Image: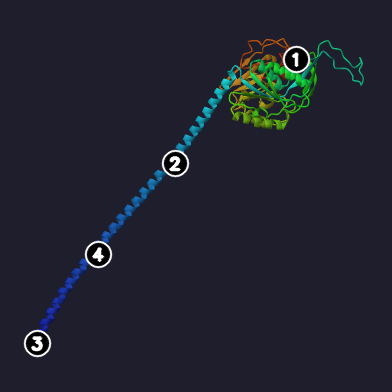
Amino acid sequence: KISEAAQKKASEVAYVEEHIHEVGEQVGEGVAIARNGASAAANDAKKSAEAGVAKGLYTAKAAQQQATEVADLEAHIQKDQQAAATIALVTANDAASKGRVKVLGAAMHVSHPRVHVIGNSVVDVLVKGGSNRLEGSDSFSSDNVEMISEPIIPVLGGSGAASAYVLAKLGAQARLYTNLGDDSFGAMLTGWLQDAGVKVVSSHASATATHVIAIQGNRRTSSYYRGEKVNWQAASAAPGIGEGDWCLISGYGAVEQEDLAEITAVTKTLTACRCLVAFDPSPWFAGKVDRDSMLQLWATLDLLTATEEELLQWVGTKKKKMSSEELAKECLLLCPRARLVVVKRGAQGASWAAPGAESGSLSALSCDAANRRHVQRPTCLQPRLWAPGCCCGGGCCRTRYESGTKWKRCNRSL
């Protein structure tokens, strides 16, 4: 029984061991399967991760490329905008320039242009034939009185009055802003100007400027009372001044540094309302203002006119000799806005230069009548440029030029 029981136990143990062995094999197979599954999962995860990284890198690269393309596009757009702005600015400037040229051309060829003249008025008293060598005394006697054979002649002078007179005689609607006095000389000059068709706007000074000129042969001496200051602002406040009008501004004997600054401000105001501006510096600014200030004024002008001597004060050329046409061209380079520069040459006429290498000269028309009323205007005085004569020496009222005189140096008219 014990042996049978032991044998039975042994059989049961063998069965258990066999079962354990089977379970062990199954566990081994499960572990292998688990290992294989883990390895496959790891491989799948690795592949997924690598694919994700690759996809992320591709996406990042694509995003970077897209950002670069966007930046390039923005740069191109900015360049296009700048180019468009530049083209628009050039087009606008060109249109404005062409428009101003058109206005200038129309104003220069209109039959009865409106011209506002700002400048002084002077009575030039011409005394011819005296010796001017007498000694003065406090009594009236034959010792201090010189008898002369030629009459003493008062004539219209002054850069403003002379130019306005001539322009009105040539058919322009001339308006003069000046410093005439409330005295007999002022009334006389006002009458002469109004007879010529000039509209006089006076500041009603206390006394009229007077220039007594003693002439002996081809020499002259003079005494000059310059009168009161000219109001440069007067024309800029004139009613109706604007497109197609001209404004001629002329220097005179009483100008100073502050006058040039005020004139520059006036020219800017006038050009803003499309009024065309001409300037005659006269000789009186020389030594009183610096060259840079003068050229700042020239930069605002549509037309510059002066004598050769007056222009050479400001050109600063190193050429020892140049023709009047060459001088006009040199001045044109200093006037970026100007469409015309006129060099007045007195009895020799005038020379001129315009943009586009255009230049030329005109001869003067000599007239014998001086200070004489009701003289018919010559029909040949019709060109757009003219040299009417010398206003300081009695020239605006058709003064006769004599060879050898220096009156041509005093020409102040446009």
Residue that carries the numbered disc 4 in the rendered image: 38
Locate the N terminus by quadrant: bottom left
Residue sitting at x 84%, y 12%: 148
Mark number for residue 75?
2
> Disc 1 or disc 4, which is closer to the eye?
1
Question: Dot 2, crowdedness within 10 Å: few (<14), some or many (≥20)?
Answer: few
Check if mark 1's residue and mark 3's residue have beta carbons within 8 Å: no
- First of labels 3, 2 by sequence position: 3
> Disc 4 or disc 2, which is closer to the eye?
2
Residue that carries the numbered disc 1 in the rendered image: 405
Check if mark 1's residue and mark 4's residue have beta carbons within 8 Å: no
- First of labels 4, 2 by sequence position: 4
Looking at the picture, tell me which residue is in the foreground, 42 or 200: 200
In three-dimensional space, the C-alpha distance between marks 1 and 4, rounded to whole angstroms, equals 123 Å
Horizontally, residue 142 falls left or right of residue 355, namely right
Instruction: Examine the image and state in which quarter residue 110 appears.
Output: top right
The answer to whether residue 393 is visible is no
- First of labels 3, 4 by sequence position: 3
In three-dimensional space, the C-alpha distance between marks 3 and 4, rounded to whole angstroms, equals 48 Å
Q: Secondary structure at mark 2?
A: helix
Check if mark 3's residue and mark 4's residue have beta carbons within 8 Å: no
Residue type, mark 1 in image: Thr
